[in-house]
Image (spheres, rainbow, N blue to C red):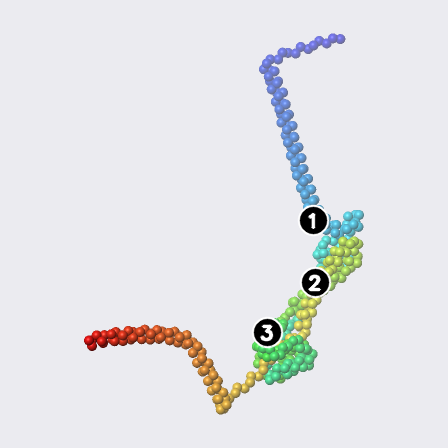
Amino acid sequence: MTTTPIALPELSDDAADRIEEAVFTQIAEERRAEHARASASRGRARRRGWLTAGGIAAAFVVGVLVTPQILQLTGSSGAAGSSAVSAPDDSSGGAAPLSGNSKELTQSADGAASRNAAGSSSSTPRDIIRTGSATIQVDDVRKAADALAALAQKHGGFVESQQIGSSQRPAATDGIVPPSTGDGWVTLRVPAADLPAVMDALRAEGTVLATSVGANDVTATTTDLRAQVDSLTASVQRLTQLMSQATSVADLLTAETALTERQGQLQSAQQQLKDLESQVDMSAVQVTLVRQAPAAADPAGFGDGLAAGWKGLIVSLNALVIALGFLLPWLVVAAVLVAIVWGVRRARRSARARRDAVAQPESTD
């Protein structure tokens, strides 16, 4: 079977040009579309690259900051990635895990104790530090100091410090400033309830020149210190429990560090509270002792007059010697000037006498 070729119509030059232009236009459009798709793909790839880089950087920063803390807590015992020490249930029924640094570790140990210790200040009596001071004029300072020591012992107190035979002012004690200087001072500690009686008893020791009584309310300070002591005590107990339940060396070291810090804070607060309570219970009394002034001597007697005259003579002689010492340089200068003037005048008289002697024989001839 033979096929007869189909005869195609002849194309004119214009038709060929139109077909060629249409083909090239379609090819150009297909290329532009492919280029747009490639540009969009590259943009998405670039954004994915930036996002990936940002995620890697963030993961690196988080790893640098968090990983040491996690490694410190987990140590080498956690195949699952974390190890925790569970404390016994507290009054609220929860258990606090051991995590974070020493400050984060003890937040749960401090919270409940702080809340429990904060609410009882309204019924607490006032804590007031009462002090007294006095200046007494006495005949014998040492005997007066012994009498003051006996007075303090009588009221259940003691002598805190004393200085006899010195006119220096003692250092301020508990805010007391001695009113004046004297030949001695004594600081007494007596029960606060006996302070008025002790101040009244000072009148029997000599002539009271000045007295003062002061009061300083430290209730807020003592209440705050008591709350700190209660909170820190509960925190120390809780950290001790956490140490006993530690499952790794890292947990044990973290709890031990926090426990040492809390124990130091507890001891400091306890010492401050003890000092304030001691000052509240035992008032300080600062007593300055001044000797009686001796009676002035009567200068009306002959002996006193003679002594006064002798002293006046000595004073006058001293004044004369001082005056001579002051005038001596001037006298030397004046003597030199007088000698010069006298020498000049004598030379002139000698010259005049010679001229007269020469002139007299001539007149005789």
Q: Report the disc number at residue 65.
A: 1
Left or right of 233, for residue 292: left
Numbered disc total: 3
Q: Mark 3 or mark 2: name the one nearer the start of the chain.
A: 3
**Mark 1 crowd level (few <14, some 14–19, many ≥20, 10 Å Cα):** few
Residue under label 3:
177
Residue 131 figure quarter = bottom right
Left or right of 99, for residue 142: left
Q: Mark 1 or mark 3: name the one nearer the start of the chain.
A: 1
Residue 322 figure quarter = bottom left
Instruction: Look at label 3 and name its amino acid.
Output: Val
| Relative vertical location of residue 236 with respect to residue 159 in this rendering, above or below | above
Q: Mark 1 or mark 2: name the one nearer the start of the chain.
A: 1
Mark 3 residue element: loop
Residue appearing at x 35%, y 75% in the figure = 338
Mark 2 residue element: helix
Instruction: Look at label 2 and name its amino acid.
Output: Gln
Query: Residue 202, how many percent across, how many down?
Result: 62, 81
Q: CA distance from mark 1 to mark 2?
A: 29 Å
Residue under label 2:
265
Query: Which quarter of the rendering shows the N terminus?
Result: top right
Query: Residue 242, how many percent across, how many down?
Result: 77, 58
Residue appearing at x 63%, y 74% in the figure = 130
